[in-house]
Image (cartoon, rainbow, N blue to C red):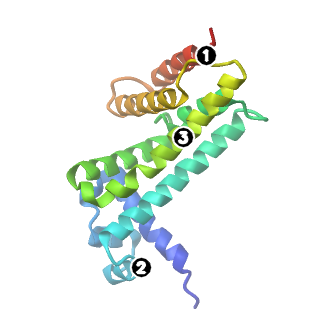
Amino acid sequence: MQVDHEERRRQIAEALLRIADTQGLQSASMRAVAAEAGVSLRLVQYYFETKQGLLLDALARLGAQLQARMERWITAAGSPPTPRGTVTAVLSCILPTDPESRRITRTYAAYYALVLSDPDTLEKHGAAQPALLEGFLAKQIRAAQEAGEVAAERDAQTAAAGLLAMVNGLGSSVLGGQRSGEEAVGILERHLGELFSAR
């Protein structure tokens, strides 16, 4: 029987992501991942020689899941997409307001906790996706400036960084029970209303 190596790698990486979501990455030993995936420890070690290799592979898969979610939300926001619609869709889909976004947010939080306790493990890799996302949002804000929807004097990069930081903070407050997902969305929409009102 032909073994689908990519499918086996995915099965193992997704087992790690499930543990990260429900227990945190401190519980994701290679042995625990093998048990969660329903495979032998030797098989996990065959596909991922090191724990760091497994962590980074799973992080890339988590990023791809978030990217796919963003693309679905951007498509649902309307065609052709407008800068404001795109920024709103991207930031709204990050907020933990449904089971998928709560899982993604909790799992990223597990990675952030790992960076704090073991900076060398993910320091070089953990910032790549947030930086790309910030650049994408800044590009949308600049397009809105060209269309006269955002004040020309606003610094697009700073605005994008502030929006992402705010959404990350709102996400933590939702997961921590400080406010509901609906309240977080309302706060985001008020900030976007202020940004997309050129005066």
Vertical relation: 149 (above or below) 33: above
Alpha carbon separation for disc pair 2 and 1: 51 Å
Task: Inspect the image, locate mark 2, and give the three-letter code of the amino acid beneath it.
Answer: Tyr
Q: Position of residue 136 (x, y in %)?
A: 58, 40
Q: Position of residue 82 (x, y in %)?
A: 72, 30
Q: Position of residue 176 (x, y in %)?
A: 32, 32
Q: Earlier in the sequence, mark 2 or mark 1?
A: 2
What residue do we see at 51% from left, 18% from top?
Answer: 191
Classify mark 2: helix, strand or loop: helix
The part of the image, by quadrant, that contains residue 145 is top right
69 left or right of 112?
Answer: right
What residue do we see at 44% from left, 46% from top?
Answer: 103
Residue under label 2, please give it. Answer: 47
Q: Residues within 10 Å of mark 2 (few under 14, many from 20)?
A: some
Q: Residues within 10 Å of mark 3 (few under 14, many from 20)?
A: some
Q: Position of residue 148 (x, y in %)?
A: 70, 18
Q: Residue furthest right?
A: 80
Classify mark 1: helix, strand or loop: loop
Task: Inspect the image, locate mark 1, and give the three-letter code of the amino acid beneath it.
Answer: Ala
Residue under label 3, please give it. Answer: 135
Q: Earlier in the sequence, mark 1 or mark 3?
A: 3
Nearest to the eye among marks 2 and 3: give it.
Answer: 3
Alpha carbon separation for disc pair 1 and 3: 18 Å
Residue under label 1, please give it. Answer: 151
Quadrant that contains the N terminus: bottom right
Vertical relation: 149 (above or below) 27: above
23 left or right of 144?
Answer: left
What residue do we see at 39% from left, 74% from top?
Answer: 38
Q: Residues within 10 Å of mark 1 (few under 14, many from 20)?
A: some
